[in-house]
Image (cartoon, helix red, strand yellow):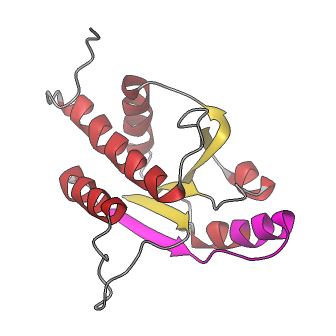
Amino acid sequence: MLHLIAVGKLPRGPKGGPKGGPEAELFARYVARLRLRLVLTEVAEARGAAAEVRRREGAALRAAVPTNGFVVALDLGGTETDSEGFAALVERWLVLGRPVCFLVGGAEGLDKGVLARADHVLSLGALTWPHLLVRVMLVEQLFRARSIAAGHPYHRDARP
């Protein structure tokens, strides 16, 4: 099972569903295509000085990790990989028999305690991305990783 544990909340509509914004729509589209159960847990954004925000959000992220969860922290300082490499990592993590938990911090980044708890620290690249788009990019890459593992033609590894 996969978990996405993230700071902040997707916009909600009047009945609690997604508001229909582009990030929520793309996220829902890729989650539906994933065919693996993905549990989204959102923790509240903290307020205050940057260090205190990171500390509070970090504590909330760590508290949301299931017992024996395999933690993958998304952080600028993590290791980068291509889609094939990510697919291989995901396959390795899935066979561990532990919940695989991707942690996405807030605007101030991840607390050192979260990075210390992580089993793997992953970077989606050197660019700064809005946190709602990070969710979309991550779930698309998870779908792509599963497609690569299944030999599905969604991923094209040839470059022009």
- Say if 110 sits above or below 126 in the image: below
Quarter of the image containing the N terminus? bottom left
Query: In the picture provided, is 146 more to the left or to the right than 45?
Result: left
Check if residue 56 falls in the magenta segment.
Answer: yes
- The residue at the far bottom in this view is 15
- Say if 71 sits above or below 8 in the image: above
- Say if 153 sits above or below 51 in the image: above
- Say if 115 sits above or below 153 in the image: below
Q: Quadrant of residue 40?
A: bottom left
Q: Position of residue 126 (x, y in %)?
A: 61, 32
Q: Position of residue 28 (x, y in %)?
A: 27, 62
For the point 40% across and 39% down, which residue is it? 90
Give the residues drawn in magenta, as a range: 38-58
78 and 136: which is toward the camera: 136
Query: In the picture provided, is 97 more to the left or to the right than 70?
Result: left
- The residue at the far left in this view is 153
Query: In the picture provided, is 105 more to the left or to the right than 124?
Result: right
Label count reads 0
Q: Position of residue 114 (x, y in %)?
A: 71, 56
For the point 65% across and 36% down, which residue is it? 78
Q: Quadrant of residue 85?
A: top left
Quarter of the image containing the C terminus? top left
Q: Position of residue 15 (x, y in %)?
A: 28, 91
16 and 80: which is toward the camera: 16
9 and 114: which is toward the camera: 9
For the point 47% across and 59% down, which residue is it? 132
Query: In the picture provided, is 105 more to the left or to the right than 115?
Result: left
For the point 58% across and 36% down, which residue is it? 127
- The residue at the far top in this view is 160
Check if residue 159 falls in the magenta segment.
Answer: no
